[in-house]
Image (cartoon, helix red, strand yellow):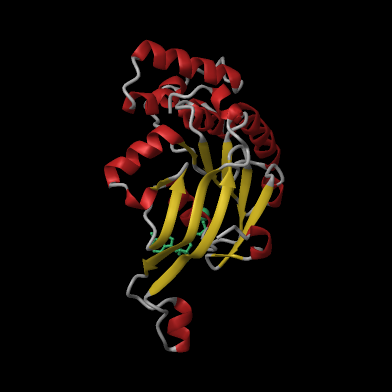
Amino acid sequence: MAGAVTSIKDIDSSSPIVTARNVTKIYKRGSEPGLIGRILGRSEPPTVHAVDSVSLEISSGEIVGLAGSSGSGKSTLLHLLSGLEQPTAGTVSFQGTDLTTLSARERTRHRLENIGIVFQRFHLLDSLSARANVALPLVELGVPKSERRKRATELLERIGLEDRITHRPGELSGGEQQRVAIARALITDPALVIADEPTGELDTETGRTILEEFKQVAENRTIVLASHDQETLEICDRVIQLRDGAIANRRTQEIRP
Ligand code: ADP
Ligand code: MG
């Protein structure tokens, strides 16, 4: 989105940026019975409710954590909130637009303009410099090259990588690679940043430093962060606990009908 950082600060912090209503994602399992099923002599159910009737509202500027053990539905819920995946049932709205009514092409555009994504495993292109990796989303948006370079350089400087601008990912440490990935997620000035286990590949100390930098560079943006690590979740304003695809601490998550 073209809006300047100041416009994000100006947004009424009480207005929801993302609203999910009874959102459900059902996946088909492979037809093979699982190990437990084989031991017990029966097959597992053919489907899995990865996310099961979740309702939540995320306000502008909030940092919300998704907690829960492996398989509890954190990644799937992030994908639904960002429009990367379509729910089986229920709706996800972004600033009042129901994402489930958009075509695949419109959702891709929406993601490009409004959402920044930080992955656990960085997902940088090995053949490109740090700066070119950061600038990549701007290529898709048709931003001219000189502007792309300028904005990517500025962001890399702000995240402390001013002497790594022309390095390739293979020449960077894990922490440096994740800082490049964070800069790439922020380059389009997205209103919402989602981060899936952003410290999962980093040692504790590096993870802590990167999170602080992430929070600073993201300024007052809305962040939804999935992690099973308690320390990582400490940067969040509130934490939603998932269990078997559903909100476990539902009492604190009630939303108005
Ligand atoms: P988490 O991120 O909390 O570990 P996930 O959202 O990745 O949880 O997974 C939730 C459940 O959905 C798990 O049982 C997982 O095996 C299942 N699942 C996730 N993605 C798929 C998929 N593409 N196809 C089938 N099952 C999936
Ligand atoms: Mg996950």
- Quadrant for residue 113, please give it: top left
Q: Residue at x 47, y 85 (%)?
A: 39
Q: Nearer the viewer, residue 106 or 207?
A: 106
Q: Residue at x 45, y 25 (%)?
A: 134
Q: Position of residue 142 (x, y in %)?
A: 31, 22
* Residue 113 appears in view: yes
Q: Nearer the viewer, residue 253 or 30?
A: 253
Query: Quarter holding the C terminus?
Result: bottom right
Residue placed furthest toward the bottom:
41
- Quadrant for residue 136, please give it: top left
Q: Residue at x 35, y 75 (%)?
A: 32
Q: Is residue 105 above or below residue 214?
A: below
Q: Position of residue 188 (x, y in %)?
A: 45, 27
Please indicate whether residue 76 sits to the left or right of residue 8 in the image.
left
Count of numbered labels shown in the rendering? 0
Q: Position of residue 224 (x, y in %)?
A: 57, 45
Please indicate whether residue 123 sits to the left or right of residue 247 in the image.
left
- Quadrant for residue 43, please give it: bottom left
Q: Is residue 5 above or below residue 81?
A: above
Query: Quarter holding the N terminus?
Result: top left
* Residue 124 appears in view: no
Please indicate whether residue 188 sits to the left or right of residue 68 in the image.
left
Q: Residue at x 52, y 65 (%)?
A: 245
Q: Position of residue 187 (x, y in %)?
A: 47, 25
Residue placed furthest toward the front:
257
Q: Nearer the viewer, residue 203 or 13?
A: 13
Q: Is residue 224 above or below residue 252?
A: above
